[in-house]
Image (spheres, rainbow, N blue to C red):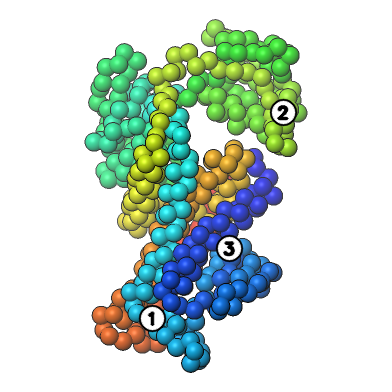
Amino acid sequence: MTSFLTNLVAFVALISILVAVHEYGHYIVGRWSGMKVLRFSIGFGKPIWMRKGGKDQTEYCLSAIPLGGYVKFLDGREGIVEPRDVGRAFDQRPIPARIAVLLAGPAFNFIFAILVYWLLMAGGIMIVKPAVGVVEADSYADQAGLEFGDKIIRVGDVVATEWESTLVAILGEMVDDGRVPLTLAGSDGRERQTTLQVGSDKTRLTEPGVLFEGLGFVPWQPPAIIAELPENGPAANSGLAIGDRITTIAGQTIRNFEDLRIAVQPRAGEEVVIEYARKGQPGAVDVQIGERTVDDTTHGYLGVGWSSEGGGDFYQRIAYTPLESLNSAINRTWTSTVFTINMLGRMVTGDVSIKNISGPIKIAQIAGESAERGWRYFVSIMAVISISLGVLNLLPIPVLDGGQIVYQLVEGLKGSPMTERAQIIGQQAGILALLLLMSFAFYNDISGILG
């Protein structure tokens, strides 16, 4: 469990970086388009730091409320434009230039995601192939005949190469008609077809964190069977032995080594009960979790290792040239963007649970957890949220970039700006829509905390 301080710091860092990227897009394209920038602010409210720079003496600010930011352009609708600045106000520039400025914020969010994925893929990546882990009895997966170790070859017509695209394909198939056609390869290498039938339960399964539990299987990972037991480690001193399969730690179910890591890491120095199975017979031991400090952070340490023997077929290292990794990063960003748009549309139709709308509390938890797992996890989450931010800002809601683009298009078609009354009504409708969205987000966040 991450601490409040970790969540807060990670959240502020994540939001500040993504907002800076987004607003820099507006800022730099505005300058390229000949507009005068009055202020570039990260955060809202009273500035806590400010400096002026450039020929226009633009104000660069860090403001007190780190939940957004803005770029303020000179605008003739908001006051008198000095003679020397005539033609440099936002509303005095050509409509294509205004649209370019409005598009630049979301575009920079997508570009940021591409650069992050490119960085993560540089030099190649190790992936776990999509495969089936432990299958729960009488679950949808069990009814479809899925077995431990089955490799997922295709989801519908989509070739399954790694888990992220496979999950997108599973969700895409499921929300259509409650059916997920799968092509599997068993331990003997033979391929077979089956279908996960979830029917009307499809909406519930789109709730955050419910998919695998609801389907009744987990992605394959090394089972929590002890293959290495260093001497004088907490596990060795407790009486655990090589070949034991750990089943629970402090009452928390352990299905694989990732579950084990998550259970042990925050329990440094704690005494816990570990349940295990040895040659089919259950047992339990009391273990005091050890401590290990890495980069000034203390983690729990059990002192067990797993064997890669028999698991090599589930791992693949993909080597990329710089151009290949860039192409893969672009494709990944595009796939995630299309998926996000589809899921938003499915929320409107009721096919996808609105519990997927997350607010600042949930984002802070995700940011904190990813930060504790390492910089690669953190920047990967930043890329995902950056894509979501880009898509959200393109929605045709008047207070967002997408709504402002609609205003500019209407002005271009009718040859004059929309009336002030029409704009005010649009702004009010946009604020109402955002308030409803924020209400759902906070409700989901608080519901998640309350369990």
Q: Amino acid under label 2?
A: Arg
Between label 1 and label 3, give the one nearer the viewer: 1
| For marks 2 and 3 on the same chain, the one whose residue lies earlier in the sequence | 3
Give the class, few, some or many, for how many residues have Cα within 10 Å of label 1's Cα (few <14, many ≥20): some
User: Between residues 122 and 419, which one lies in front from this camera angle?
Assistant: 122
On screen, residue 91 above or below 19: below
| For marks 2 and 1 on the same chain, the one whose residue lies earlier in the sequence | 1
Per the image, label 3 sits on a secondary structure element best described as strand
| Residue under pointer 3 | 67
Q: Amino acid under label 3?
A: Leu
Q: Position of residue 97 (x, y in %)?
A: 36, 74
User: Between residues 268 and 307, which one lies in front from this camera angle?
Assistant: 307
| For marks 1 and 3 on the same chain, the one whose residue lies earlier in the sequence | 3
Q: Position of residue 308 (x, y in %)?
A: 50, 16
Q: Which residue is drawn at the image coordinates 72% and 25% (left, top)?
A: 289
Q: Position of residue 421 (x, y in %)?
A: 39, 87
Instruction: Tell me the number on the disc at residue 292.
Output: 2
User: Between residues 94 and 226, which one lies in front from this camera angle?
Assistant: 94
Cα gap from disc 2 to disc 1, whole angstroms: 60 Å
Q: Amino acid under label 1?
A: Arg
The answer to whether residue 204 shows anywhere in this view is no
In the rendered structure, are the residues bearing label 2 and label 3 in contact, judged by CB atoms less than 8 Å apart? no
Q: Is residue 223 shown left or right of residue 140?
A: right
Image quadrant where residue 219 sits:
top left
User: Between residues 66 and 330, which one lies in front from this camera angle?
Assistant: 330
Instruction: Tell me the number on the disc at residue 93.
Output: 1
Q: Which residue is drawn at the image coordinates 40% and 30% (left, top)?
A: 318
